[in-house]
Image (spheres, rainbow, N blue to C red):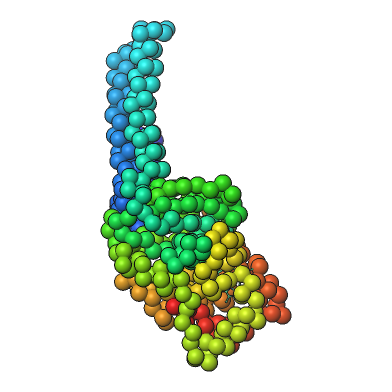
Amino acid sequence: MRLQKISKTSFFIATTLLTLLITACYPDHNQSTFDPQGPVAASQLNLFWWIFIGGMIVFVLVEGALVYAMIKFRARSESDIPAQTHGNTRLEIIWTAVPALLLLIIMVPTINGLFYMYEAPKLHQANHVLEVIGHQWWFEFRYPDPNDPEKEIVTANEVYIPVGYPVPLNLDSVDVIHSFWVPKLAGKTDMVPGEGNYMWFEADVPGEYYGQCAEYCGTSHANMKFKVIAVSEPDFKSWLQVQSNPALESSDPLVQEGAGVFKSAGCTGCHATKTVVNKGSKGRVGPNLAHVASRRNLAAGMLRNSDENGSVNDALLQKNLRTWLQDPNEVKPGNLMSSGAQVYTDPDKKLTEEQISQLVHYLSSLK
Ligand SMILES: [Cu+2]
């Protein structure tokens, strides 16, 4: 009676957990690997299915044999001693050889997939190598400057790619190991400081793809997100052109005052507002803010500035900038702005409400 009760409860718990587990993989999710939108992710999902289905077949056969043996060779009464077997060379050879053979078979598509990840079939067509640099807890992106091969264009937390083109990526990090992951475009690749790593991806359809750091890197690891936006090639080119220019200067006095506060409050120590830098030069401590007002998110994916259709909503952006400047730590625990900027560490230098308003005006003019 009691035993029955326990097994009912555990059955209930097990099925609930299983349901949760299965729905977690639902393709509709923004970060589902079951909804590949590019050839790299598709090839990796394909490999997953082969291994998963193969594994299921092995599982059913082994469990079937186990259940069969348990029933067939059970003790039938108190006094019955079932047949005792000690070793069976033929069986042991079989169950060593078969898994070895299966592993050998799986090795073929796996190694193929690995080479595919490194060697894009059309890679020579790609004219933009994207540099990605991990920072605690945000992503820096750099494209070669189309106007000057010695220069690079810097942006952060949001990057555009041309749809239908392979995009080669060089990965690096300035602090600890991060991992670059856009689930719908390609599997994770580690970003190891000073080591340099390489991958590529391609988006088949235009859209907004969610990315996330996939290697634990400290307090705000879970808050280290980014977006890849795939657009047509002409749109990509015009985006890059906009990125290469500084934001338009505004004559609005509040904006001008904000620009003044931006300098006097020490923001320029960590944030650049020009995007063109020498190739390979060291980046700043904080994200480039030249076009921060054109980004769909603030603080590496923590606050959403855009409407459903992806266009930035000015009211939302201003509210988010204010929230961020009032207390970045509230938005993103452990972030290096709260611990490094004097306006947060030194109570005497704390930003006044007026200064925050001026900064918000200035930053939201950086389109
Ligand atoms: Cu991380």
The correct choice, above or below, for 131 with respect to 241 in the image is above
Identify the residue at horizontal 54%, vertical 60% (top origin): 279
- Quarter of the figure with the C terminus: bottom left
Asked whether 200 or 323 is in front, the reply is 200
Identify the residue at horizontal 64%, vertical 72% (top origin): 269
The total number of labels drawn is 0
Position of residue 48 in the picture relative to residue 351 (left or right): left
The correct choice, above or below, for 117 with respect to 69 in the image is below
Place of residue 267 in the rendered image (x, y in percent of width and height, measured from the top left): 61, 75
The quarter holding residue 116 reads top left
Asked whether 315 or 8 is in front, the reply is 315
The correct choice, above or below, for 37 with respect to 306 in the image is above
Asked whether 119 or 149 is in front, the reply is 149
Place of residue 57 in the rendered image (x, y in percent of width and height, measured from the top left): 28, 29
- Quarter of the figure with the N terminus: top left
Place of residue 278 in the rendered image (x, y in percent of width and height, measured from the top left): 55, 64
Place of residue 51 in the rendered image (x, y in percent of width and height, measured from the top left): 33, 34
Identify the residue at horizontal 61%, vertical 74% (top origin): 268
